């Protein structure tokens, strides 16, 4: 161990910027263990003030990873849009453009491919991308409504051309919920015919939540409780929250 | 006073006369407006044989292209190769330490028509520099990647340093970067002064571009960003006069090392009479316009989102996007789809390229939704044509709009922009007074003839002066 004196000499040595790079540098002997320990333990949430622009840039630089990361980035960047520092606000606006651009580019490429030869995976993908892009915009945003309509319209095309699989049908219900069309979402859910499966119950809970029928949300969540393990962690947390509220 | 015509070498990068755009049209107007000056164009381009997009005015007496990607053949040798390499090494150390090196030593050791492409990588000193830099910046990834990134970056710099500058009384670079570097080299080789005009901030613009490009890996991104920052700092250190378009940019230049007493703001101007001659006529409805290209940086989608909000409250509203639609066809298609989806088809118009004066005659408010601007001339045009303006808070816009928050919004905020449009709609008397005041402001401070006259004075004065020696 060289001790943390390593940091005094940072300008003349390799300075890993991520814990991944620090680990690789440790393995290959280019940085001491302290460097990795430092990077691995100094984890600061992306959205925590003061916002670390380098960390945002690094995350942006990795390209679109998943909707959760992009969502976190968008919410953080939206806060930065109002920064009194012009360069920071500009960085935020251009970064948002970059994220939107990545989705739009993928959507446009898919559109071109679908115009030439419509395919089931292509239509499923474009509907998902449009819904993801919509989700990136905050509630009440006109752009959110626009991309939700786009997603809906692609799902309808998918239904006409190839029929809706379970995943796409579920997406259709969720898009309707996000659009605020709860009655239509409910009848789609019934049409889906997945009975009282975990997915169906979760969608029902979401519809009732949007209707602000919180008593019914809690009832559905109770029914859902035995099947909790089959849900993803976010959904499990939401259900757990409602069950707690019900106690 | 010397009665000889001043000979000004205008150094441009990726713009006039090969590429159209804001800086190019400014350069063209400047040259055309000053027939008493002889201009030498020194254009730095990324590739060879680019067609001219402008008919060169008669006072362009010479035009020389420098192609960054072309390897030049050395016709001279350094007097003392070892000394030159030591200077390069010292320069790197200075950069590493965050200071701006004495560049005159490098230029002294590296004669014109000598291009250090080979020496820089095959010499012991050059190799040591690359290896050491790789150890600091990129030891965990393949060395070959780093080598080629390093080499391509340095080769462009050596092309600029080795190029023999045209003869001139004044070297006027229209950006920092490679154009600025060429001006620094010209100044150091000839002793003639260097005038720098920055329309935006070169290093910031390049940084944003690099961030957008996904294939540039982390260490390469850092390397390019550092290089562009250093090129700007070098220009700020060596330029005899440094012009920015507005105060905010001047402050950034000073923060980056520009001596305050050499900086000055000369805003861009417009043909005031041309736009003031617009005959205003009321047209049925309420007309909201955006003048600009349909490209992401103008954020036309936010304009469309704002239009939906406005339309809900003002059913008589009509929306016009006045500008070319063919620069990013995918974005334009997306915008059109959005207009359809927002059920705005009947009231939303993409005009394509058009004479803006036809629209200035009846627009009730001009909107700017851009996420990036320097000093947008459309605002001044609208002022002269007596149209109220609402805009995002970018570049010099807050200053142009007197920091009046009623007409300013953060980028990507259609709700706030719509609110500002409603304010304009609901306060016609106040707007009538405001447009008179704004028109007066544009006439007094942003007349293009005055702007170019100031450049003429600068050219004349600098042509008489000796260069400031760093």
Image (cartoon, coloured by chain):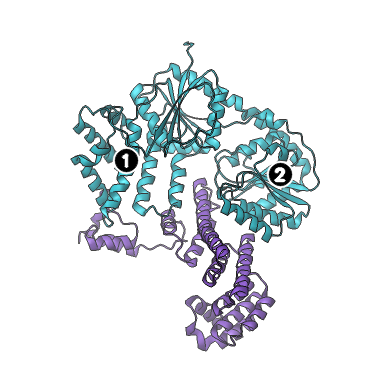
Name above or below for residue B77 compared with residue B355.
above
Q: Secondary structure at mark 1?
A: helix
Relative to B224, is A159 on the left or the right? right
The alpha-carbon separation of the residues under discs 1 and 2 comes to 49 Å
- Residues marked 1 and 2, same chain: yes
Q: Which chain is purple?
A: A
Question: Residue B425 location, x and y as percent?
Answer: 75, 47
Q: Nearer the viewer, residue A228 or B38?
A: B38
Measuring from the top left, give residue B421's x and y in whole percent. Answer: 70, 49
Q: Considering the numbered disc 2 on the image, is that residue within a helix, a strand or a loop?
A: strand
Q: Residue furthest front?
A: A116
- Residue B111 in picture, x, y percent from top left: 28, 27
Other-residue count near label 2 (Cα within 10 Å), few / some / many at <14 / 14–19 / ≥20:
many
Tell me if label 1 and label 2 are in contact, CB under 8 Å: no
Q: Chain of mark 2?
A: B
- Visible residue check, residue B427: yes
Chain B on-screen colour: cyan
Quarter holding the C terminus of chain B is: top left
The residue located at (27%, 51%) in the rendering is: B144
Q: Nearer the viewer, mark 1 or mark 2?
A: 1
Q: Which residue is mark 2?
A: B365
Using the image, determine if residue B462 lies above or below residue B376: above
What x and y, as percent, mark residue B294?
60, 48
| Sooner in the amino-acid sequence: mark 1 or mark 2 | 1
- Residue beneath disc 1: B154
């Amino acid at each position: 161990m060289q001790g943390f004196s390593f940091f005094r000499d940072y300008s003349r040595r390799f300075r890993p910027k991520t814990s991944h790079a620090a680990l690789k540098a440790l393995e290959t002997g280019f940085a001491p263990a302290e460097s990795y320990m430092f990077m691995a333990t100094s984890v600061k949430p992306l959205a925590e003030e003061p916002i670390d622009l380098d960390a945002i840039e690094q995350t942006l630089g990795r390209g679109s990873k998943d909707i959760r990361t992009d969502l976190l980035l968008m919410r953080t960047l939206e806060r930065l849009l109002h920064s009194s520092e012009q360069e920071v606000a500009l960085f935020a606006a251009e970064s948002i453009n970059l994220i939107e651009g990545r989705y739009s580019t993928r959507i446009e490429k898919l559109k071109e491919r679908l115009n030439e030869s419509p395919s089931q995976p292509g239509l499923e993908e474009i509907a998902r991308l449009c819904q993801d892009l919509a989700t990136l915009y905050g509630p009440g945003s006109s752009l959110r409504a626009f991309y939700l309509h786009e997603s809906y319209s692609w799902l309808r095309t998918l239904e006409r051309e190839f029929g809706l699989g379970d995943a796409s049908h579920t997406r259709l219900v969720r898009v309707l919920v996000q659009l605020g069309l709860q009655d239509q979402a409910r009848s789609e859910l019934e049409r889906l015919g997945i009975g009282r499966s975990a997915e169906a119950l979760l969608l029902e809970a979401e519809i009732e939540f949007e209707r602000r029928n919180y008593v019914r949300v809690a009832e559905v969540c109770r029914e859902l409780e035995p099947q909790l393990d089959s849900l993803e962690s976010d959904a499990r947390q939401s259900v757990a929250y409602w069950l707690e509220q019900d106690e | 006073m010397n009665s000889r015509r001043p000979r000004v070498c205008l150094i441009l990068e990726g713009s006039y006369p090969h590429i159209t755009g804001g800086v190019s049209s400014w350069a063209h107007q400047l040259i055309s407006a000053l027939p008493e000056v002889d201009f030498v164009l020194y254009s730095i381009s990324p590739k060879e044989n680019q067609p001219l997009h402008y008919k060169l005015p008669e006072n362009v007496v010479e035009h020389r292209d420098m192609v960054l990607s072309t390897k030049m053949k050395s016709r001279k040798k350094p007097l003392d190769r070892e000394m030159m390499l030591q200077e390069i090494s010292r320069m790197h150390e200075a950069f590493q330490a965050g200071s701006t090196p004495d560049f005159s030593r490098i230029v002294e050791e590296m004669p014109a028509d000598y291009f250090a492409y080979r020496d820089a990588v095959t010499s012991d000193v050059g190799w040591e520099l690359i290896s050491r830099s790789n150890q600091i910046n990129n030891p965990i990834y393949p060395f070959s990647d780093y080598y080629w990134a390093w080499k391509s970056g340095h080769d462009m710099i050596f092309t600029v340093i080795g190029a023999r500058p045209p003869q001139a009384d004044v070297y006027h670079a229209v950006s920092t970067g490679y154009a600025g570097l060429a001006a620094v080299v010209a100044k150091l080789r000839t002793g003639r002064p260097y005038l720098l005009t920055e329309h935006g901030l070169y290093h910031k613009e390049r940084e944003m571009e690099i961030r957008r490009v996904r294939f540039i890996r982390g260490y390469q991104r850092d390397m390019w960003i550092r290089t562009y920052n250093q090129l700007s700092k070098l220009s700020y250190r060596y330029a005899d006069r440094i012009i920015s378009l507005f105060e905010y940019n001047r402050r950034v230049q000073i923060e980056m090392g520009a001596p305050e007493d050499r900086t000055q703001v000369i805003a861009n101007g417009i043909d005031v009479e041309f736009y003031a001659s617009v005959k205003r006529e009321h047209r049925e409805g309420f007309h909201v316009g955006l003048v600009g290209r349909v490209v992401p940086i103008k954020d036309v989608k936010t304009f469309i989102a704002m239009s939906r909000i406005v339309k809900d409250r003002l059913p008589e509203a009509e929306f016009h996007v006045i500008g070319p639609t063919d620069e990013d066809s995918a974005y334009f298609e997306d915008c059109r789809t959005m207009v359809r989806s927002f059920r705005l088809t009947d009231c939303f118009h993409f005009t394509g390229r058009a004479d803006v004066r036809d629209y200035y005659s009846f627009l009730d408010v001009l909107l700017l939704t851009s996420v990036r601007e320097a000093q947008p001339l459309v605002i001044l045009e609208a002022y002269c044509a007596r149209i109220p303006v609402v805009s995002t808070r970018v570049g010099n816009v807050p200053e142009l709009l007197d920091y009046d928050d009623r007409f300013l919004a953060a980028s990507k905020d259609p709700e706030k922009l719509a609110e500002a449009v409603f304010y304009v709609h609901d306060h016609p008397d106040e707007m009538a007074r405001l447009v008179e005041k704004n028109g007066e402001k544009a006439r007094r401070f942003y007349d293009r003839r005055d702007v170019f006259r100031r450049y003429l004075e600068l050219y004349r004065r600098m042509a008489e002066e000796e260069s400031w020696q760093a």
